[in-house]
Amino acid sequence: MNFSAILRYLGLLTTVIGATMMIPLLVAAASHELEAAPAFAVVMGLAVVIGGSITLATRRVRTQLSRRDAMVLVVGVWITATIFGALPYLLSGVVPNFLDAFFETMSGFTTTGATIFSSIADKPHSILVWRSFTQWLGGLGIITLFVSLFPLFGLGASRLLEAEAPGGYAGERLTSRIRDTARIIIIIYVCLTAIQILLLVFTGLPLFDAATIALSTVSTGGFAATNLSIESYHNLLAEIIIMVFMFLGGINFALFIWLILRRRWTRFFGNPELRFWVLIILVSVALVNLDLIFNKGLGVLESFRQSSFNILSASSTTGFTSANYDAWPGFSRSLILVLMVIGASAGSTAGGLKIIRLIILFKYAYRRILQAINPAVIVPLKIGDTTLQEATVSRTIGLTVFYFGLLWGGFVFMAALGLPFEEAISSVASCMSSFGPGFGAVGPYGNFEHIPGIGKAALCFFMLAGRLEIFALLVLFAPPFWRRY
């Protein structure tokens, strides 16, 4: 294993993370935040010095990565970024201990949106900007963001996205080089963020609020700068704009490249995964709308407003809320839980199991039914015009088993810590799916502050496992992974 190359990547990452803290540092200086500004300055200097020293010390090492190297690096990137990203919370005194700071930062970089803050609006602006910025950085994955920068330092990056790719379904080579694809994706990502900021300002939101919301929308992160999330603004036009960008964040970004660069409209709108996701959203909104009208007594317009926003938020695993869905009838709350676990498209910034895997599982189950009727029948699994390899189907089934196995094991573990049933299962599900809020004390009006320390550490593990598609993290615990071949 090429530990020197891994260390070089981590050194470069640490340097870049330190450099990005210039943004909240400037906000702190402009807002005269006397405690937050020194915290960001110290951490920025520390990260740049440590990262720069490692990068210089390893400048002559061989930087070619094997698949195992890439897997170790992907996990190392998230943990390293979280450690340094947590320090401003701690040094500024906003968070009293490192575990809580680590939890908040891991929630940011994994775009989860779970928080330990009981009150948000009273926090320094620089902290809130950094909080949302961690989600923006994590939106497409820190690896994806920096894969276009590493080659400038002579670092090969062709295996990095492969290690993080969600199942291998969206990994079509759209340009001749993977770093060019990454650059295009980053440009699209930045443009969507900038457009949303401008549109939200147009609706009357303050620039600070518009910026923090936009940073957490396309990234499907869900951190807001107010205590009641989007509900605080009572702004219908802003809700509609946020819904549009939550939806865009849940779409496979490869489709944007086909649409923008190659004008392949049919490939975009005819994508089976996108069409199935839209169908799920429409059916879910209709069902919840009826449930809120007949079982909660809401008017038709208010019911549609609440159901459409919160269902799309759950399905895209964003985590913004425009109403307290925890007060909804049991059917609607159950549907929220199901949608957050399923998630959105592969290749998007959303979490969850992913729609494409759900399609594969349905097709596989249908094939098994046909083979039970006639064992001799041969039914190839196809998505669109593409015939799936059996290895892909096998990986999908295996990942699904591990996903729900972790979900169930996590639920039992959290329940053993004394959490009520709904709180235990929803806390694990929301963290693994990167949705954020759950039900009960961890619901949209609650937070994760009261969770025992060991429970917070476990939830950090579930956040990372869900973000890295399970296998990329669990494989590190397999003894054969570390053997020499």
Image (cartoon, grey):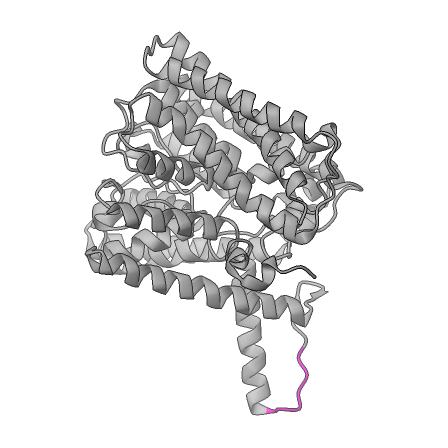
Q: Nearer the viewer, residue 280 or 112?
A: 112
In reply to whether residue 45 is colored magenta, the answer given is no
- Answer with left or right where residue 324 lies relative to residue 251: left
Magenta highlight: main SS: loop
Does residue 21 appear anywhere in the picture? Answer: no
Residue 196 seen in render: yes
Q: Nearer the viewer, residue 174 or 8?
A: 8
Task: Please state which of residues 41 and 401 is positioned toward the viewer in this rendering.
Answer: 41
Q: Position of residue 88 (x, y in %)?
A: 39, 24
Residue at 64% x, 57% y is 169
Q: Quadrant of residue 64?
A: top right
Q: Quadrant of residue 58?
A: top right
Residue 127 placed where, x, y %? 37, 23
Which of 55/112 is in front? 55
Residue depicted at 69% across the width and 40% down the height:
257
In this rendering, is residue 355 above or below 73?
below
| Range of residues picked out in magenta | 374-379
In-image side of 339 versus 226 (left or right): right
Q: Position of residue 311 (x, y in %)?
A: 38, 49
